[in-house]
Amino acid sequence: MESESKSESPRPEPLLSVRGLRIAFAGVEVVRGLSFDVHPREVLALVGESGAGKSLTARALLGMLPPGAAMTGSVLPDLSAARGRRIALVPQDALSALSPVHPVGDQLAAAVRSVRRVSRRQARAVAVAALDRVGIPDAARRARAYPHEYSGGMRQRAVIAMATVNEPDVLVADEPTTALDADRRELVLRVLAEQREAVGASLVLVTHDMEAVRGHADRMLVMYAGRAAELGPAGEVLERPLAPYTAGLLASLPRPDGPRLRRLPTLPGTPPAPGALPPGCAFAPRCALADDRCRAEEPEPREAAGRQVACHRLADVPQEHPV
């Protein structure tokens, strides 16, 4: 839990509390005992290397785990039954998320009528207003167009409109800026931030983009091998990582204000496969600080400087590579 001064008002109750979340396929755990909260109007970023379990965690919040997944632990309250109204997904691929055979406005109107008892005409008006709100020009006319008639940027706006049209409490965005150029990435993040503020939603942002985390996240949860390595205020974690994995991950990324020709340090090795975890700390084989205890005993998250950090060698983490 993050520390609060006596002059600060108490933090509101979380919208979501995830406790002991475990997700397995054929008995092999991919997410291993994850716990975190999502507070009203906050942006929580889930970061880490591919395979860390970020997207599965996000899908668990939505009740959209793939076939064959076995989940234990709790997500409270359970918003998945009210998907679209209380919790909604902003998909990564806008083109595949939209039906090619129906006008965009009809798809938004159908989303409205799936959770509200309104007429077709009323749903249509809400859909047009949502498209206008995300900056679709001449929204009433463009609502009659098909997705292939939209530009890539307009399709991105349209899926954000669909996710926010019913004013959900929580938005889940799974890698919304992957494979986008810098201009499109900034557009998506700006529109997403504007719409989140407009409807008063919290956001769970799954991303590899640390500039997106820096510019938009309130807190960040760094995941490794299905567990939390570090959880805390985004700015503090980026500037002074405490977990060795966080420090190594951030050190391997280019700094926006750093020398462009500097050779970046890299994390040695690769993350372990879910079914082949080493004993002790899963990061120990890649960690220069690992000792016998690290190789024998998996660390549990503990309080450190207002954060939750899972590391036996916390006091020895170097700080010369903030991002």
Image (tube, helix red, strand yellow):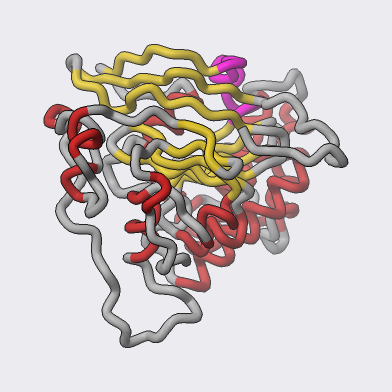
| Segment colored magenta | 76-87
Nearer to the camera, 163 or 299: 299
Where does the image place residue 219, in percent across and percent down from the top left? 59, 45
Residue 84 lies in the magenta stretch? yes
Nearer to the camera, 95 or 56: 56
Residue 115 lies in the magenta stretch? no
233 horizontally vs 258: left or right: right
**Is residue 19 in view from this perspective?**
yes
Where does the image place residue 158, in percent across and percent down from the top left? 58, 50
Nearer to the camera, 126 or 20: 20
- How many marks the image carries: the answer is 0
Q: Kindly identify the residue that appears in the image at 48 percent across and 76 percent down.
A: 256
Where does the image place residue 190, in percent across and percent down from the top left? 64, 61
Looking at the picture, does residue 211 appear above or below residue 55?
A: below
10 horizontally vs 66: left or right: right
**Is residue 104 in view from this perspective?**
no
Q: Kindly identify the residue that appears in the image at 15 percent across and 33 percent down.
A: 278
305 horizontally vs 299: left or right: right
Q: Kindly identify the residue that appears in the image at 26 percent across and 50 percent down.
A: 289
Looking at the picture, does residue 214 appear above or below residue 41?
A: below
Nearer to the camera, 128 or 81: 81
Looking at the picture, does residue 265 appear above or below residue 24?
A: below
Q: Kindly identify the residue that appears in the image at 25 percent across and 17 percent down.
A: 68
Query: For residue 283, what is the image quadrant?
Result: top left
Where does the image place residue 251, in percent across and percent down from the top left? 36, 65
Which quadrant, please, contains the N terminus?
top right
Q: Residue furthest left?
A: 276
